[in-house]
Image: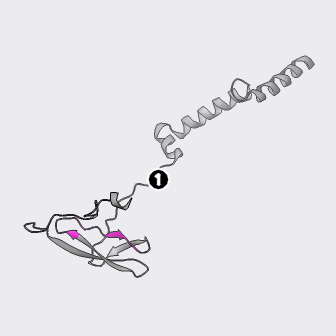
């Protein structure tokens, strides 16, 4: 079995290309420090846009740049509630009219859960028999 193993190079583990005649891209070292005090450097291209934060390789917290790059503060829209969206479509007066109309239909047994209709129908039958 030992005779059947591949001899020579480790497959995939080693490149046979040499670095002669290759010109590497210009690089820069960017330093970061996390809230727990871990300091580390990342190698980046000179042309790359350097981010203000980077994940700390030790603890996973957001580390800030030590070279003074500030985070961009994004303008956040205020959160819209269901009520806000409803008021974009209808006025409060219209909503009150719709509510009144729907409550009358519900109380009259025309809409709503079936168990409410049965109870209302019995009450109406009992009231009509006594009068």
Q: How crowded is mark 1: few (under 14 residues within 10 Å), some or many (20 or more)?
A: few
What kind of element bears circle 1? loop
**74 relative to 92, above or below:** below
Q: Is the magenta stretch mostly helix, strand or loop?
A: loop
Position of residue 110 in the picture relative to residue 22 (left or right): right
Q: Image quadrant of residue 67?
A: bottom left
**Quarter in which the N terminus is drawn:** bottom left
Q: Quick one: 11 or 48, which is closer to the camera?
A: 11
At horizontal 47% and vertical 49% (from top left) the residue drawn is 80
**84 relative to 95, above or below:** below
Q: Image quadrant of residue 45?
A: bottom left
User: Any magenta on residue 46?
Assistant: yes
At horizontal 20% and vertical 65% (from top left) the residue drawn is 48
At horizontal 30% and vertical 79% (from top left) the residue drawn is 66
Q: Image quadrant of residue 113?
A: top right
Q: Position of residue 114 (x, y in %)?
A: 74, 26
Q: Where is residue 19 in the image (x, y as percent from the top left)?
A: 13, 68
Q: Quick one: 112 or 126, which is closer to the camera?
A: 112
Residue segment shown in magenta: 44-58
Position of residue 78 in the picture relative to residue 126 (left or right): left
Residue linked to disc 1: 79
Q: Position of residue 119 (x, y in %)?
A: 82, 27
**117 relative to 8, above or below:** above
Q: Quick one: 50 or 118, which is closer to the camera?
A: 50
């Amino acid at each position: 079995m030992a005779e059947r193993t591949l001899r020579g190079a480790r497959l995939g583990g080693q490149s046979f290309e040499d670095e002669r005649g290759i010109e590497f891209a210009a690089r820069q070292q960017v330093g970061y420090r996390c809230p727990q005090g871990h300091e580390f450097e990342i190698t980046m291209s000179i042309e790359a846009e350097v981010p203000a934060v980077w994940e700390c390789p030790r603890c996973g917290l957001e580390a800030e740049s030590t070279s003074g790059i500030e985070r961009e503060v994004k303008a956040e829209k205020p959160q819209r509630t269901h009520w806000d969206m409803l008021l974009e479509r209808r006025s409060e007066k219209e909503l009150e009219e719709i509510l009144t109309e729907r409550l009358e239909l519900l109380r009259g047994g025309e809409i709503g859960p079936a168990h409410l209709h049965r109870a209302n129908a019995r009450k109406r039958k009992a009231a009509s028999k006594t009068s």
